Amino acid sequence: MRMMIIGAAGMVGRKLTQRLLAGHADVVTPTELILYDMFDAPAPDTDLPCTILSGNIADKAESEKLAAFHPDVIFHLASIVSGEAEVEFDKGWQINAHGGWQLLEALRAQHDASGGTYRAKVIFTSSIAVFGPPFPDAIDDDFLCAPQTSYGAQKAMVELLLADYSRKGFVDGMSIRLPTVCVRPGKPNLAASSFFSGIIREPLNGVEALLPVSDEVRHWHASPRSAAGFLTHAAGLDFNRLEGRRSLNMPGLSCTVAEQIEALRSLAGEKAVSLIKPQADEHIIKIVAGWPRNFTAARATALGFSSEKSFTDIIKVYLDDDFEGTL
Amino acid sequence: MRMMIIGAAGMVGRKLTQRLLAGHADVVTPTELILYDMFDAPAPDTDLPCTILSGNIADKAESEKLAAFHPDVIFHLASIVSGEAEVEFDKGWQINAHGGWQLLEALRAQHDASGGTYRAKVIFTSSIAVFGPPFPDAIDDDFLCAPQTSYGAQKAMVELLLADYSRKGFVDGMSIRLPTVCVRPGKPNLAASSFFSGIIREPLNGVEALLPVSDEVRHWHASPRSAAGFLTHAAGLDFNRLEGRRSLNMPGLSCTVAEQIEALRSLAGEKAVSLIKPQADEHIIKIVAGWPRNFTAARATALGFSSEKSFTDIIKVYLDDDFEGTL
């Protein structure tokens, strides 16, 4: 099975590449990989044929080039993050929305040129940013999209396109609405959600972390391992089971910042917790106030998607998979 | 107030033009009209300055031309109908979705060029086709969009764009999700919903009408007068009252085809009813099975939008406003 990852150099893209190659029993494994991003993804450690490409997904010719590979499965993860899309209005709509549309158009052209025999399975990473307040205590699978960021609107738009191109049979697609991925390894990024990882990762590495919001803030999390697992699970799923509703809220863990901090204390002690420095940031407080706090994720759970059950488990995944220091 | 109607030659566009000029106390009236469609709209009977233009809204230059008028209010009604958008995939996405996006881009360019002083009020006619089954008995204002037609997906996409361009302050927009407009005057059109009007209009005019679905089918209706009224009410509404959720399900009347027929019988007698000829059409049965049947429309009602309370009232509107024969 020829698999393509668009956005392969990003954190989730690299986790996904590793997971596809790790030989888990529950993962449909590739026979060939095509890794694409705005810069070259690191070459994975594999004997499989692997093509590494880079370019700007907002260019129509790039989408056409990618579709011409006739991947059996395409993971479309590429986007600029929420904070950047909010500041760079044109760039966000061009890359996140128009780029997705062009990719679908290129895949439709390949479908048509093949006489209808080529139909890519397309798995798109959407986000809980498609939702906007006011929220119920737990968002169910019938809740409206009312994004309050350009990033969320762009994700919701590609969801609509992917569903319609799939309904017409040009591709066979599904949108995975990721929880906030936490604990992200590496450095802070421009996403307004970056601190949710920072307040765990930095203290574990002996570094101070700023907490820009109240510790009463409740949010919806899943580990990078779970995020990659959602994608590989989707690759093995018969999308007819989605019954025409092809955008799915993924399972996750709802917890408060205070509960995150308690989990850190239980695993790394008081010294780590003391490195978290509350410093209110009105800009981030305002953005985060518009974010969902909890979901039922009933459909996704029934379809076999799963994630962590406690924030302690989420930190343990970071310690297992990414932590390079010593506690 | 300079008002522009895009899609002015269509049925709702003409009703809207009349209503804007009729001098109702509850209507914000224009001081100038610009009427645009793919062909010239009929010249309205008015002393106001009135510009009549035609062209293809899918052309970028057309959007730029329209935005350059700096209308205070733009009613964007133009689209190809559901049946046509389902058959003509490219045309539907180009006109209904990309056309709307280009219009917003042209308005943003005018906003920017004016130093931020120009901000059009944009009222977009969306549709209950943004929803897809399974449905609750009555769809509330928090129910998800899951369109099962390209037309519905295109409407939902422009809703997302309009909301985000509004949130950023480039325009001040709202999407009006129209019920099926019934009784439409004139001839049947390509919409799969056309028969809902046909089974009333044709018999009133002494002509046979085919009924392609069971008389147990329940659907959601409002008269052309109500549709125009929603639009003029929106023109006078402070959109800050929408609190960031700028797409609104309009009020309507939920009734079965059998109830439609009973209303026809009560106003026009058995002879009219005998002109309705059941003739099952599996294609239309399948499409209609995916349509909503009832709504709460609580937010719209609270914001002062209103419509008919019985199907008899809906037929009476047709008799008052459009019927040219004698009963």
Image: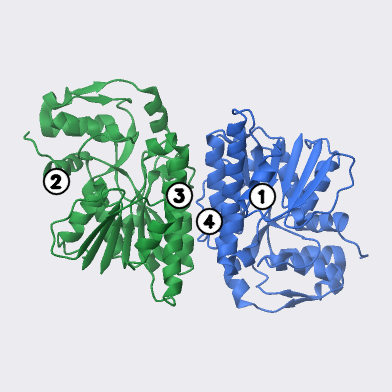
Chain colours: A green, B blue
Q: Amino acid at mark 4?
A: Pro
Spatial CA distance of label 3 from label 1 is 23 Å
Which residue has dot 3 on it? A97
Q: Is residue A292 left or right of residue A168?
A: left
Please, which chain is the residue tagged with disc 2 on?
A
Residue B24 falls in image quadrant: top right
Q: Amino acid at mark 1?
A: Glu
Find out whether the residues at labels 3 and 4 contact each other: C-beta distance under 8 Å: no
Location of residue A25 in the rendering, given as x and y in whole percent from the top left corner = 16, 64
Spatial CA distance of label 3 from label 4 is 31 Å
Spatial CA distance of label 4 from label 2 is 44 Å
Secondary structure beneath dot 4 equals loop
Residue at image location 87% in from the left, 72% down from the top:
B206
Spatial CA distance of label 2 from label 1 is 55 Å
Residue A220 falls in image quadrant: top left
Nearest-to-viewer mark from 3 and 2: 3
Please, which chain is the residue tagged with disc 4 on?
B
